[in-house]
Each structure stands twice: as C-alpha cells, then as structure tokens.
Image: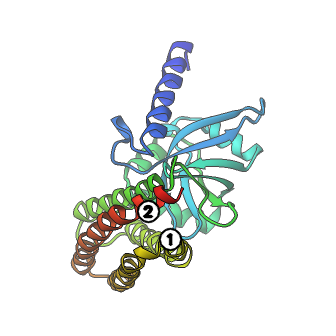
Amino acid sequence: MPNDDKQKFIDFNQQVIDEFRANHGRVGGPFEGGRLLLLTTTGARTGTPHTTPVGYLPDGGERVLVIASAGGAPKHPDWYRNLLAHPQVTVESGVFTYEAQAVVLEGEEWEQAWARAVEAEPGWAAYQRKTERVIPVVALHNIAQGGPGHINASSPGEAIKVVHDAFRHELALIRKEMAAGNGTLGAQLRVNCLTFCQGLHNHHTGEDTMMFPFLTDRHPEAAPVLKRLSEEHERIAVLVAELRRALAGEHADPAAARAEVERLTLDLEAHLTYEEAELIPLLDATA
C-alpha cells in the first residue's frame, strides 16, 4: 500500500475509534447500524498495542466471531497476524471492555461459522472470491473474571443507560434483519436472537440478585418500585422463553418469531424506560 493511502487508512481508522469510544459503540459512515467492536492486539514484531475497528458476529455464550477478510486482499490483515503471535487481546464493545483469548476456527467449526457469516452478509463471500487465501474466522473468548468486563461509564446511573441502549440497538438490528429476510429464519439470525435473550437474562439476574438488594438496603423507601421491577423481569422472562420456542428448530416459523420479537420489543422498551426513570436517581444518589 502506498504511503499516502496507508496514512489515509490509519487516519480513517482513528476517526472511527474516536467516534466509537465517544458514543458507546455507535458510529456513522460505512459502519453505521452494524455490529462493530474495537480489537486491540499486540504487534507481532513490535510488541506495541494496535487497535482496529472490526465487524463481528454474535455467537451465543461467552464469545464473538471476527473475520479476517481485509476486504478480500491477498494477505491477512495485520491484526490477524498479531493475534497469531499474541492470542490474548482486548475487546471494546462500546459498553464493556474485556480481555479475550483469540482462537482461530478450523475444520467443521470454521465451515459452520463461515456459512452463517455468508448467510447474514453476502459481502463476505464476495471477499472470498477476490482472494486465493482462505479467510480466517476467529473466536474471541471473554476471559474476564466475575462478569462481562469493565463497563464504559462514569457513574452507576450512566452504566444502566448505556447497557439498556446496547439492548435497544441489538434488538433494532434483529428486527431489521428479520424484515430483510427471505421468508426463512437464517442460522445466524437465530444465534443473534438467542444471544440477545441470554444477555438480557444475565442483566436481569444481576439486578435481581445484587443491585436490587443493595438499593433496598440503602433506600428502603424504594422497596415497592424494586419489587415491581423484579416482577416485570419475571414477565419479560416469559416473553423471552416464548421467543426461544418460536426460534427453535431449523424450520421455525418466521412470522411467529417476528411477532414474538415485536411483542418483546414493546414490553422491553417500556420496562427499560421505567427502570431508568426509577433506578438512575437512586444509583447516582448512592454513588
């Protein structure tokens, strides 16, 4: 790459990184509305950290997938060569920052992940056609202890808001993907939905078992509100279970799944708004 082009690429990446960090993962331009993370690797030769914006795929559980496409270039991207030398990396999701272990997928696991990626975004296949190398898929396993990682917020109240906004963003993406589908539920779309459901379950479990008892102890007058929120968690858990059933199986009914997502969206949006109105003042007063 000529020096001028390389500098333009570096400058563009830095603009995306700055915007990402300033807006809790939201960016405009070519990445607007997509799933993006910041991946910091250790230079294979220099040992210095390098941060790169990378698109990702949810993969359920405690890992996400990134694809070393480099736009179909003949060589692997620098970040991929770095993580081969130093597999421990740092991931920024916009909400959380955490350490991860990078594992390159091989064999059947690569085939399944690649098929899901191409199904979700045909552009990956176009990149593969441009190059003779097999484009790697890398799993980033969260190795943070005791939770999803450090939350990128300056106060407990802001932390609730940015987590909630991440749920809103992901649910909007899922609805968009469903609307753009061809009448079937793709494997990656099912993974996206189930990853969202698991994240929501973990968030509500953390509130019920840790945050709400803590706030009840500090603010006894808020006990009725916190009780109501816990009851709403139970109601939303029923909706999530119904969504899981609608998504189950290779031949799940797209119309049923879409209806469940719409129901969950309406109920969840009302719950998140009410929860923010009640919890943010309590959390910020306690901090």
From this view, report whether residue 169 is shown above or below residue 253. Answer: above
Marks 2/1: CA distance? 7 Å
Q: Residue furthest front?
A: 221
From this view, report whether residue 232 is shown above or below residue 266. Answer: below
Residue on which disc 2 sits: 282
| Residue 62 percent across, percent down from the top left | 59, 66
Residue at image point 50% right, 71% down: 215
Q: Is residue 31 left or right of residue 17?
A: left
Which numbered disc, 2 or 1, marks the residue that appears first in the sequence?
1
Q: Quadrant of the C terminus?
A: bottom right
From this view, report whether residue 211 is shown above or below residue 153. Answer: below
Residue type at the position of mark 1:
Leu
| Residue 168 percent across, percent down from the top left | 34, 60
Residue on which disc 1 sits: 215
Based on the displayed image, in which of its 4 quarters is residue 19 positioned? top left
Q: In terms of depth relative to the viewer, which is nearer, 154 or 57? A: 154
Residue at image point 30% right, 59% down: 172
